[in-house]
């Protein structure tokens, strides 16, 4: 599959680039994408939620009433979960939500969403560009020139501090490098914008 290479004005450069079949021409695997997104979402959870059980409550352990003859249920202390301010039964505890996904499955998931974007015409290839300094207005202008609507992710071959700082505060937009972009980011982008060199690097 070949796509036009655009400049930052959104116009065709007259050149086309061949998308590598191994990344943009595979049959998407919905299950692999599901596992990759599930792992990403799980990793976002801090897992710091905590509720005190009865042994952690700082209250008197004195027996609050006699065992029998009161007409009500027996009670040993005010730490009981039955009383207001008492401990919680089987409350949440801090734990790790991370799940393991095989490297090959994660790669298949990323390749699946890349192929899906290319097949649906949601991929734009832009010739490599630089910003002399962080400039959000220039980044917005770039998106407007490319007629980007909705969410977008710009994928660069390598780190570019000025481009990253220019795009980090724009709602529904993001900047990532080829090695760091993940399946979740690509999947939830309405438009995937990739630099020409990032495509060439995939072809190596």
Image: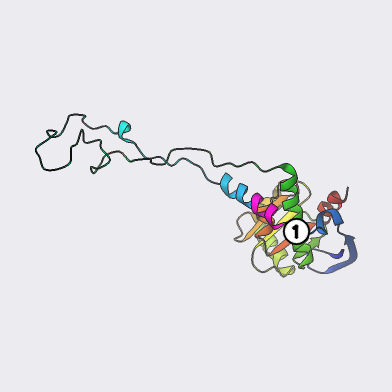
Number of numbered discs on residues:
1
List x then y, in percent, for residue 150: 64, 67
> In x, y percent, where is residue 50?
40, 40
Q: Is residue 19 left or right of residue 107?
A: right
Residue 186 appears left or right of 124 = left
> Residue tagged by mark 1?
28
User: Which residue shows up at 80% across the image and 61% down it?
Assistant: 125
Q: Is residue 146 above or below residue 36?
A: below
Q: How is the image coloured?
A: rainbow
One can see residue 134 in this view: no
The structure residue drawn at horizontal position 34% and vertical position 40%, both measured from the top left corner, is 89
| Residue 201 point in image, percent of width and height | 84, 49
Indicate whether 73 appears above or below 41.
above
Q: Residue at x 79, y 49 (%)?
A: 157
Image quarter (top left, top right, bottom left or bottom right) of the N terminus: bottom right
For residue 85, say whether it is visible: yes
User: To which quarter of the image does residue 118 belong?
Assistant: bottom right
Instruction: Give the overall secondary structure of the magenta segment.
Output: helix
Determine the image quadrant of residue 101.
top right
Residue lying furthest left: 69
* Residue 127 forms part of the magenta stretch: no
Tell me which segment is drawn in magenta: 29-36
- In this image, 107 relative to 94: left or right? right
Provide residue 196's location: percent of width, then percent of height: 83, 56
Task: Using a 10 Å C-alpha cutoff, classify the residue at mark 1 as few (fewer than 14 neighbours), some (14 to 19) or many (20 or more).
Answer: some
Identify whether 87 is placed above or below 44: above
Q: Secondary structure at mark 1?
A: loop
Residue 23 found in image quarter: bottom right
Of 138 and 194, the residue lying toward us: 194
């Amino acid at each position: 599959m070949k796509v036009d290479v655009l400049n930052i004005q959104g116009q065709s450069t007259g050149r086309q680039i061949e998308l590598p079949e191994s990344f943009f021409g595979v049959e998407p695997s919905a299950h692999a994408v599901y596992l990759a997104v599930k792992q990403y979402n799980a990793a976002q959870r801090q897992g710091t939620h905590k509720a005190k059980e009865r042994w952690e409550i700082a209250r008197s352990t004195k027996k609050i009433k006699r065992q029998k003859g009161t007409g009500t249920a027996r009670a040993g202390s005010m730490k009981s979960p039955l009383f207001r301010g008492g401990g919680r039964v089987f409350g949440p505890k801090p734990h790790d939500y991370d799940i393991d996904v095989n490297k090959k499955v994660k790669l298949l998931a990323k390749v699946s969403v890349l192929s899906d974007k290319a097949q649906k015409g949601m991929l734009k290839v832009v010739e490599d560009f630089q910003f002399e300094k962080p400039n959000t207005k220039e980044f917005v202008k770039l998106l407007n020139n490319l007629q980007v609507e909705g969410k977008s992710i710009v994928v660069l071959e390598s780190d570019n501090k000025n481009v990253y700082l220019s795009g980090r505060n724009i709602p529904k937009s993001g900047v990532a490098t080829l090695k760091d972009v993940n399946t979740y980011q690509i999947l939830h982008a309405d438009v995937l914008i990739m630099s020409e060199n990032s495509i060439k690097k995939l072809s190596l």
